[in-house]
Amino acid sequence: MGCEGVNMKIESVVLDQWYPVATENMPVAGKAYHTQLLGQPIEYGLDENAAFYAIQCNTRVRLPVFRQHYTYWVSLGNPPALFDIPEFHEAERRVLATVPVCVRASGLRVIENFLDMAHFPFVHEGTLGEMPYTAVKPYRVEIENDELYARDGEFYQPMAAFSHEGGMNIAYIYRVCSPFSALLYKTCPLQPAKKDLVCLFVQPCDEDRSIVHMPMAYLDDSASLEDLRLFRQSILGQDLAILNNQVPRKLPLLSDLEISTGADASSLAYRHWLSEKGVSYGTFQNP
Ligand SMILES: [Fe+2]
């Protein structure tokens, strides 16, 4: 079966998107890398002029590529303009990324886990949460410009960032820009009036395998970039144990749901939003 035949099965809302294959901290110029995107083998790299390229391996066709938000993007379809993230243009921000992480789960599961605040005291005890502060305060979920927002979130965190020990209430705003891309704005403990930005860009290798790319735009000017990266990398590692054990690996979708005001409001809204968009790739269908 040719690649085009495979692609034909993937709905446009998923096929016609930009997907991350690497963050800017990863590729070495002159070296070819092999990965997978939506079931297709992809080669990518930086050529001798440090220009980013990507090729569909089976056909050797060059793919549309794009460098934005500290990330290298590829598309197998006809993507619209990538969403904007103003914080990456702010000179005061320090931009970095984790090392990418492979997950044995649908990318949609990865996004849903990112939106969930209720797991902080159990999975990230000592940093993003601690007992007995388990309550998730009500927050607002809204659709705006075809994107999903969860606003007014707040969570007590004993160590919200590398450079700040001592508990404080951290405000959370989530923005889901596309089915496999989400942003988190959270209070910067060193500048409480402002928010650090953590991006979660998921590369769907297959329906139930993903690679997580996580660029950040931080305001912290005291810690080294490596310390900031290691802090976030260890939190991501804690999530892996959860994500690799999801059953089923694909995300069950629910439809015709009222948006809840409870702790799981963002998860329900995300599933409903995916369903409304007609996303099927990476979702669990009842046999
Ligand atoms: Fe987590």
Image: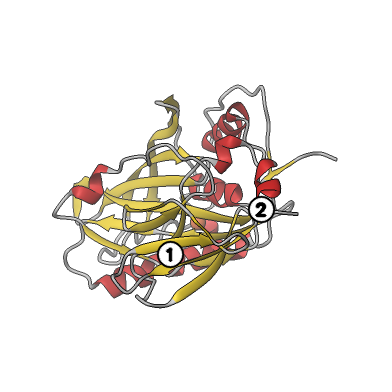
SS type, badge 1: loop
Which residue has dot 2 on it? Answer: 3
Q: Residue at x 60, y 26 (%)?
A: 276
Residue pictured at 20% horizontal, 49% vertical = 89
Which residue is identified by label 1? 126
Pick whichever, 174 or 53, lies toward us.
53
Callout 1: CB less than 8 Å from ligand 1:
no
Identify which amino acid the numbered label 2 is placed on. Answer: Cys
In percent of width and height, residue 180 lies at: 51, 46
Q: How far apart are the two marked residues, 2 and 1, measured between alpha carbons? A: 47 Å
Query: Which of the marked residues, 2 or 1, is nearer the chain's N terminus?
Result: 2
Amino acid at pointer 1: Gly
Badge 2 crowding class, 10 Å Cα cut-off, few under 14, some 14 to 19, many 20 or more, is some
| 246 vs 141: above or below | below
The foreground one among 53 and 152 is 53
**Residue 236: assigned label:** none
Q: Which residue is at the front of the view, 168 or 284?
A: 284
**Residue shown at the point (37%, 38%) measured from the top left:** 81
Q: Is residue 124 visible?
A: no
Helix, strand or loop status at disc 2? helix
Q: Is residue 134 above or below residue 29?
A: above
The x and y percentages for residue 255 are 67, 26
